[in-house]
Image (cartoon, rainbow, N blue to C red):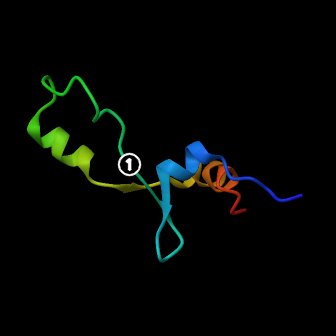
Amino acid sequence: MKLKTKKSAAKRFKLTGSGKIKRGHSHHSHILTKKSPKRKRNLRKADLVSDSDLTRVLKMLKLK
């Protein structure tokens, strides 16, 4: 039986060329008026999944 990827996770995470997993930031979709421009600008940038969450994300993406 083939393993199925969690589609919700597949839409949120991308694999980089070096094998790390890229993710977007939360808190950047609404209620933006009270957040400073600096905070909103930094939320725009992608970040890497932390080591503590990596095994969970890999399991959801069926990579490990």
Task: Judge by depth and name the residue closer to the eye, 11 or 47.
Answer: 11
Percent of width and height locating residue 13: 49, 54
Q: Residue lying at the far right in this picture: please name it.
A: 1
Image: 49 above or below 20: above
Horizontally, residue 55 falls left or right of residue 36, namely: right
Name the side, left or right, on which 4 lies relative to 37: right
Which residue does the numbered mark 1 point to in the structure image? 24
Q: Would you say 23 lies left or right of 56 here?
A: left
Q: Residues within 10 Å of mark 1 (few under 14, many from 20)?
A: some
Residue at 64% across, 56% down: 58
Give the farthest residue toward the bottom. Answer: 17
63 sits to left or right of 32: right
Q: Residue at x 68, y 52 (%)?
A: 5
Residue at image location 55% in from the left, 55% down from the top? 51
All told, the count of numbered labels is: 1
Percent x, y of residue 49: 48, 54
Give residue 41's position: percent from left, percent from top: 16, 46
> Which quadrant of the rendered structure holds the C terminus?
bottom right
Picture quadrant of residue 22: bottom left
User: Residue drawn at (18%, 39%), measured in percent from left and top?
Assistant: 39
Viewport quadrant of the N terminus: bottom right
Q: Describe the element under mark 1 as helix, strand or loop.
A: loop
* Location of residue 2 with respect to 27 vertically, above or below: below
The three-letter code of the residue at mark 1 reads: Gly
Residue 23 x, y percent position in the rendering: 43, 52
